[in-house]
Amino acid sequence: MTRHHTADPRRRDRGGRSRVDRFFAVTERGSTYAQEVRGGLTTFMAMAYIIVLNPIILSGATDVDGHAPTVAQLTTMTALAAGLVTILMGVVGRAPIACAAALGVMAVVAYQAVPLMTWPEAMGLVVWQGVVIILMVVTGIRTAVMHALPHDLKLAIGVGIGLFVALIGLANAGFVSAGEGKLLQMGTTGHLTGWPVVVFVVGLLVAAVLLARRVPGAIFYGIVTATVVAAAVTYAFGVPDAEWGTAVPRLPADLVTAPDFSLLFQVDLFGAWTSAGPASAAVILFTLVLAGFFDALGTVLAVGTRAGLTDADGQMPGTSRILAVDGAGAVVGGLTGSSATLVFVESTAGVSEGARTGLAGVVTGGMFLLAVLFAPVFGMVPGQAASCALVLVGAMMMMGVGRIAWDDVSVAIPAFLTIALMPFTYDIATGIGAGVIAFTVIRSASGRLREVGWLMWVLSAVFGCHFALAGIERLLGV
């Protein structure tokens, strides 16, 4: 009998590399299957909180008809959209970047769009956000913007995102919080108290020591250790569920839950322009596009730099494909009713664990799809355990600060504003905007107008409009 060797994606070529290896360029990028799987799992664990957080925020957003999606609906759709788009990013974008419901867009949807229209109409605007972003990629506008940014500003964006990610981790862990009469304070009362903070510190120290000893999987092991400790102290000391926040390290009553797909395709593409009015709908759409555009821009630059995948100009290979998938993610998020599904800065956690290719994204996406059924199991990883990964990633992303030309004032001030304003305003786009405007004005006023480029002036004008949006709305009577 003749044997037919067909359709095995792992079949090796004459050079010893499998088809999967060649497709994702695993060996070419200096990675291994083990690194990609470990990195994909670490990224998932660092961002799994979104499965719980997104439903909590959006289910509290009541539309003009008094309706709001349920937590069960949003949990299913959040995990489904994240899984599908992240796998698409891995296969098409071939980058170690995961996607999920974007926090910045989520806030615009919940607090700006939904109060003025129905939920399907708000999701229609999210779909249009994705369409606009895709058109910007197809026309080359988005890639041109990435090329227009000065190299030092790109480095500053990566460093700023590192601080931003670290602050997210510290806040989620309860290590810092907003205090009465002060911007931030230690703990929730000015002091560190409670088992959740202990769990965070244990995970942070374990991962940090393993990183220093160059142990593969250091951050992943830190998260797992923290989760085990969290579960142990919860049962041993009776820690109230409320102290852990949205994810409680307690064995669930049911390991599997029935998914609720009723939000799928509940979209009205044109109703928002009537319900909210053309001016309000246009302002909301502009805000959605701007937030998604520059959050993704900063994240792609940060992930590429951290993974060592950028070229001499700070460009990541396959950027156009990555940005196109990011736009498609907004469309998918709107169609699933879970808000725009965009690139997630927590992807840097997986990159720090060795992820270098889209194979890691496939692993992360697969975990999100599993979470559609096993949401209670993944809900056991407390935010305090995942937060240790974000803090350590922030520390490692700070390493790029030494490559910025701090002796040039026209670089130092924009770089500082970019780095400082991301964590201070809790918004990536704000930091980028301040840096762009400062660089354009200072460099031009220094007699170096030709070094700026016309596109930087266009970006400065766009960000200027963004910062003045409240005033513009008032003038328009919105």
Image (cartoon, rainbow, N blue to C red):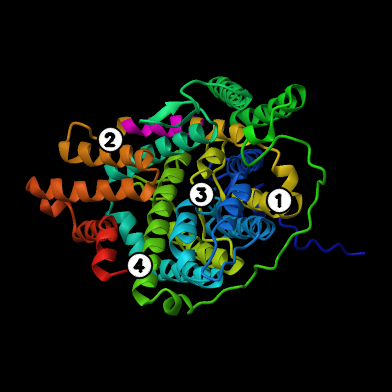
Q: Residue at x 29, y 60 (%)?
A: 469
Figure quadrant of residue 470: bottom left
- Return the residue nearer the eye: 334 or 162: 334
Which numbered tag is attached to residue 404? 2
Q: CA distance from mark 1 to mark 2?
A: 41 Å
Within the magenta stretch, is there residue 472? Answer: no
Which numbered tag is attached to residue 371? 1
- Magenta span of residues: 392-401
Could you tell me residue 439's position as x and y percent? Answer: 20, 47
> What kind of element bears circle 1?
helix
- The amino acid sitting under disc 1 is Ala
227 vs 304: above or below: above
Q: CA distance from mark 3 to mark 4?
A: 24 Å
Which numbered tag is attached to residue 344? 3
Q: Earlier in the sequence, mark 3 or mark 4?
A: 4
> What kind of element bears circle 3?
loop
Question: Is the N terminus in the top left, top right, bottom left or bottom right quadrant?
Answer: bottom right
